Image (tube, rainbow, N blue to C red):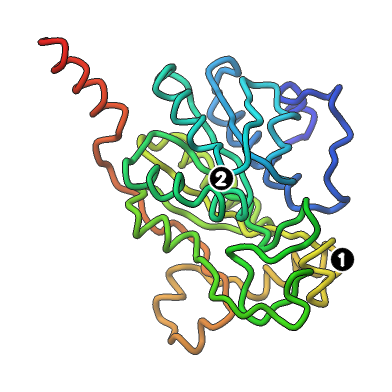
Amino acid sequence: MKTKQLLKYLRIDRWPTVWCPGCGNGIILKAFLEAVDQLKLKKDRIAVVSGIGCSSRATGYLDFNTMHTLHGRAIAFATGVKLARPEFKVIVMGGDGDLASIGGNHFIHACRRNIDLTVIVFNNMIYGMTGGQYSPTTPEEEYASTAPYGHIEKPFDIVKLALSAGATYVARATVYHYNLLVRYIKEAIEHKGVSVVDVISNCHTYFGRYNGMPEPYQMLEYFKTNSVTLQKAQTMSEEELEGKIVIGQFRKEEKPCYMDCYRELQKKAQGR
């Protein structure tokens, strides 16, 4: 798709972005816009909510109904939007730190309740905006500004976290696998219930620089060579999967979503 077709979805007067050249955030943003365009969604029926962080600045560049909210609270705000305007497609954009750390409780309960939201996780495995501190998804033994001798904590696996908490649509892609990313975002937006798309992205400025990949192409090459499909992963041993990024659609199932249950409760309370 030609980039010019997507300009109608952007607030060009807010450009240039604050993102570093080559940042994966731009790839995710374009994939989201391409998904919206292919679905032919109306701009005034889309709400995009973000918290705080590099990735959360995306809402400032999008010409939809957007909210740039508090650190970790994007899902809470988005839930309110969806309850007030159930006809809207409500999308949450946030980083691994924003959604899985300070916002982790909101994340797991959104999955548990099956709230009709699409959550796109910009997972670059580090805190990019505040100086390269390790995040909940930083792999063991990797380096960060707050882990100069190597990270000793076990990371969250966003996909496993979403699955165990009850999310009804869960997928993962990397910014290298662009076409797959567009497909998963489309499916997530169309899905009724909570949808989580974990996008492994590059922050070469911090994560890459600390871990021997200071250029964007080096991190993209890493994603290419270290990713395996879910189907292939199911034939591999734990030892073979060590250090691999498993990509694919992990769950897609239909269950009553919170919004429908809430409306039924309203009717019951009103004696209808």
Count neighbours of disc 1 (C-alpha within 10 A) and say few if under 14, some if 14 to 19, many if 20 or more.
some
1 above or below 86? below
65 above or below 35? above
Left or right, 84 with reference to 203: left
Residue behind mark 1: 215
Spot occupied by residue 118 in the image (x, y as percentages of width and height):
48, 38
Q: Mark 1: which amino acid?
A: Glu
Q: Mark 2: which amino acid?
A: Ile
Q: Nearer the viewer, residue 4 or 130?
A: 130
In primary-sequence order, the first of circles 2 and 1 is: 2
Spot occupied by residue 2 in the image (x, y as percentages of width and height):
76, 35
Which mark, residue 158? none
Image quadrant in which the C terminus is located: top left
Q: Quadrant of residue 96?
A: bottom right
Query: Residue sitting at 54 percent across and 45 percent down?
Result: 183
The secondary structure type at the circle numbered 1 is: loop
- Quote the CA–CA distance across marks 2 and 1: 24 Å
Residue behind mark 2: 120
174 above or below 257? below
Spot occupied by residue 38 in the image (x, y as percentages of width and height):
58, 31
Query: Residue sitting at 70 percent across and 78 percent down?
Result: 142
Query: Residue sitting at 82 percent across and 77 percent down?
Result: 212
